[in-house]
Image (cartoon, helix red, strand yellow):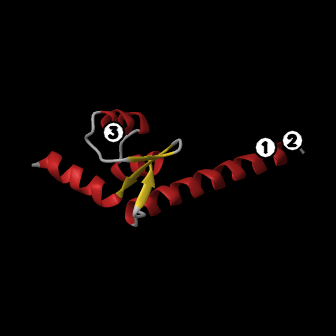
Amino acid sequence: MKSDLSLEKQLSDNTDQTQAWIKELEIRRNPPAQMTVPEAAIYIGISERKLREDIGKRQFKSIRIGNRVILRAKDIDAALEAMTQ
């Protein structure tokens, strides 16, 4: 019985990990027009902490709505383009 429960937990964990991976892949392939910091970090491929630092340095345009920080995909793309030139 114990091994059955452990197997179910492993399958559940794998399912959760797979769903998270699919969400990350979807954000990278088809980004929404507006993103939260975690979504934008996935889109760019950097950590949330690094992105927040860069927002603080005004390297990325963002707006604050209540406690949320929102970034537009076109502003992220423009900032990345400017960094590469």
The quadrant in which residue 34 appears is bottom left
Q: Quadrant of the N terminus?
A: top right
Q: Earlier in the sequence, mark 1 or mark 3?
A: 1
Q: Amino acid at mark 3?
A: Ile
Q: Residue 2, how many percent across, how many down?
A: 86, 41
| Cα–Cα span, label 2 and label 1 | 6 Å
Instruction: Report whether 85 appears left or right of 63.
Output: left
Eyeballing the image, is 25 above or below 56?
below
Neighbor class of circle 2 (other Cα within 10 Å; few <14, some 14-19, many 20+) is few
Eyeballing the image, is 16 above or below 30?
above
**Quick one: SS at disc 2?**
helix
Task: Identify residue for label 3.
Answer: 55
Q: Nearer the viewer, mark 1 or mark 3?
A: 3
Task: Identify residue for label 1.
Answer: 6
10 or 19: nearer the viewer: 19
Q: Amino acid at mark 1?
A: Ser
**Quick one: SS at disc 1?**
helix
Q: Earlier in the sequence, mark 2 or mark 3?
A: 2
At x 29%, y 45%, the residue is 60
Eyeballing the image, is 47 above or below 35?
above
13 or 61: nearer the viewer: 61
